[in-house]
Amino acid sequence: MGNPMSVVPMRRSIRPTSIAGGTKMRTSVLLTVALLVAVAAAGNAEMPAEKEFVNSIGMKFVRIEPGTFKMGQSGLLPFEVLPHTGGRGDRMDTLRPGDFDEKPVHTVEITKPFYMAVFEVTNFQYEMFDYTHKLVRGKQEGISKDDDEAVIFVNWYEAKIFCDWLSRKEGLPYRLPTEAEWEYACRAGTATNYYPGDVLPEEFRKKGRSLKVGQTPSNAWGLYDMHGNVEEWCRDWYGPYKDGKQTDPVGYADGNIRVTRGGSHGNQIYGLRSANRLGTVPEDKHDLIGFRMVIGELPKTKPLPVPPPPLHQQNVIQRSLKEVSKGPDPDKPYFKGPRKYVNIPHQMEGPVFASHSHSPCIAACPNGDLLAVWFSCVSERDREMTVAASRLRYREEQWDPATLFWDAPDRNEVGSGVGSYENGNIYSAVSLSAGAGYCRSAKVLRTSTDSGATWSAPTLSGAERAAGGGYPGHVAFKLKDGTLVANAFTKLLMSRDNGLSWYNPGGVIRGGHVCVTQLNDGRFFVLTRGEEVEGMMATSISDDLGKSYTYSPSPFPAIEGGQSSTLLRLREGPLFFGSFADWGIEITDASGDKRVVRGLFAAVSTDEGKTWPYMRLVTDDGPGRPVESTNGGLFTMSAGNSEYQGYTNGCQSADGLIHIISSRQHFTFNLKWLMTPAPAPRYPLVKVKHVKETFTGPGFDADGWGEYRNYQGGFTGKGTYQIDSGGRLNGLNRIVGEGSFEVIMAFDNLRFNPPAGSTYPGVLLRLRDARIRDMFYYIGPDQLQIISLDRQHEKGNSERSTESKVKLEKAPKSAKVKLVWTESDRRLRVFYGLDGAEPVTEMPYSATKEMPKDATAAAPAGLFYGRRFSETTAIYLMAENGTCDIDYFELRPLKP
């Protein structure tokens, strides 16, 4: 038989409006396909030579000529291109340079021409190959129902098989584009952020839910929908860019993630840039991903070797269980900590981020090491998120610096964890959102048989992304019949097939952030955050394997946002519980005295949760000293105060030691320490001391400064310390302590990024007493503002706020601020001076000046607080979406 290419006319002019869709055209194309199936190819067809080409099923292609371009993101992005967070809606100025994986910018040469499809593959075209795909049309909120809409719910393997099918039918080398070919074709000779320019025009910003192809202007080479509509699978494995010129690159030799490009209807315009990289596991398929094809032989370039493993996978020594089971004497109290496991420099903006580290998990490895993983990001609802990890090696004192554990680029991965199987192997369960947010997430599962030195290929569960999420973070325990029981935020999930699928037993747990264990009598015992009972943390108990629950108050104080608890069944038998007490919890120390302590505490029950007679503050009970909490905020660790916020997780290692991590720190102790009363306080409270800081560098004049979140800058060499902030709440902080004080600060070279939505640029001073008292003082381009929050005032433990503003006629270039706290009358006064003026002008306050109950005179000026600031009070010097140079800081104690 003859070559089918000689039977069917294959070349014609391209008209963007003639997309497969009309009945006449569909009939013609179907007849053509039937003819092609019936005709055996005599050999490979000749490559097209014309500028334009239409294949047997109506797909239109244009010829892409060889050339050279710069691959990656160059320069700073305009503010209007930057994404806004999914929570408050703040603009993420941190991303002005682009994403970390778009660097280094490098020259790429494409040496051979190829043809690229003008449009993304449509439902009609794909279903000529797989007619069963019709069953999933419109399954996601009615998206992509029509013939001429981009096909979705196609994974990488299915897209490749479609290319192979067409190749066999027509004798032409159909395939997915390489990542370099895709960006080269998208740019079409441009070097701007998008092919129309540096800011994407309004007509490209998807409105409505239609995925009809070809509805926005093409680029100069005649390609449509390169910015948005659906992401497009590329051939490459995802990996870091290499510096230096590359010729016809084909990506890495192996990997876990396949690249997608172009962004979709689910992206903000930041994610639609020519340089933006996305990706997911090749088995994944959802409503944001489709594909387009190219025609041309794959370049014969040798793939790049797989990058070396991250630090937490390097030099992992294997040890026997007998060796690592040797630990401290279990009959003597043992405590160590805190040891910081989140070690990320404040400048880091990828692949791990200094801005926000949260929601950790810890696993005891069979070789005696500890492995911690957590999400790392700027905003926990958004796409830049990655998963970080650190290793504490057996018998070492310090955790390794944090390195990347997992990243599906431009996917949210908020619910990730690690744990141990009964056979000693460890597992990783990483959330994989379709895009931003964490309500539509699948799970990527990996296992390690060598303590995390290597990991299995990822297995995807829940690609359908059922509403509300159907996959847990980590397994809590196993029933006698082998059923796994795991927590999934507000519910329990169970699995009878070792985690391949999960089901909800049906009972409603009171609250969220579930902590669960099974009691010896078979009942499920659950403690949660939120939905308190009688003002205390809720207990939910099920005696029918999770089908129903009864509720009662626990003896523990309720926790709130930024906090989560840990519940473990210890190998010795008792239950262990770790949580937080914002307003304090009563303990009995070794002297027999009862006293109230605040912060992270631990409790032990020896009667299956009926009582919790053993309770201690998680502290070494030593002299008060500054310690970092979530994101670098400082607290005073002492006999009366411990860490006041964070998500916690815990495990017990082979040597019997109990490990609990917060969002920053790691604490280790044994059961004997937990069951031994804390010593009576031996050291005085931390008081205000004189501190003078000139910022002349190269280091700080005074000890005790801590870096908070993420910023660029540092000592300028000109007697200032610069904070260049691309978001909220970034800068320095230090402990103030207890007692009356005066603090004077000077700021120069104030620069404010443009405001937008909830983004309000400025210098921000914060005085914070744990989570109880807060004072924010903003110096913005058009106003000064105080917001004061007091959650423990004389009317009870509820939030009371005070707000005060001063309008400005012009943006200040410098500012001086003085705070005066008088402990005797519990008043805080705020003074300012702008553009060279001394801080002698006092901020106006609320017209109602509240009086303390024991007052004997008229109310003095200032913000009134119901209680005194404690020894854990800290002051923060920060910038938000802008830059400032801190010129001077002096803290002086005052007489009460």
Image (cartoon, rainbow, N blue to C red):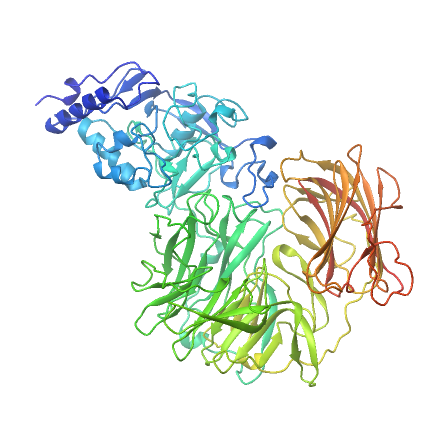
Q: Position of residue 199 (x, y in %)?
A: 54, 26
Q: Is residue 400 left or right of residue 784?
A: left
Q: Which quarter of the figure is the C terminus placed in?
A: bottom right
Q: Looking at the picture, tell me which residue is in the foreground, 367 or 566.
A: 566
Q: Position of residue 312 (x, y in %)?
A: 48, 57
The quarter of the displayed image where residue 137 is located? top left
Total label count? 0
Which quarter shows the N terminus? top left
Q: Position of residue 714 (x, y in %)?
A: 70, 46
Q: Residue at x 52, y 82 (%)?
A: 330
Task: Farthest residue to the right: give it.
Answer: 857
Q: Is residue 156 above or below residue 316?
A: above
In the picture shown, does residue 160 fall above or below 620?
above
Q: Position of residue 547 (x, y in %)?
A: 37, 67
Q: Decide if residue 191 is in sight here.
A: no
Given residues 863 and 16, the one toward you in this image is 863
Residue at horizontal 59%, vertical 75%? 335
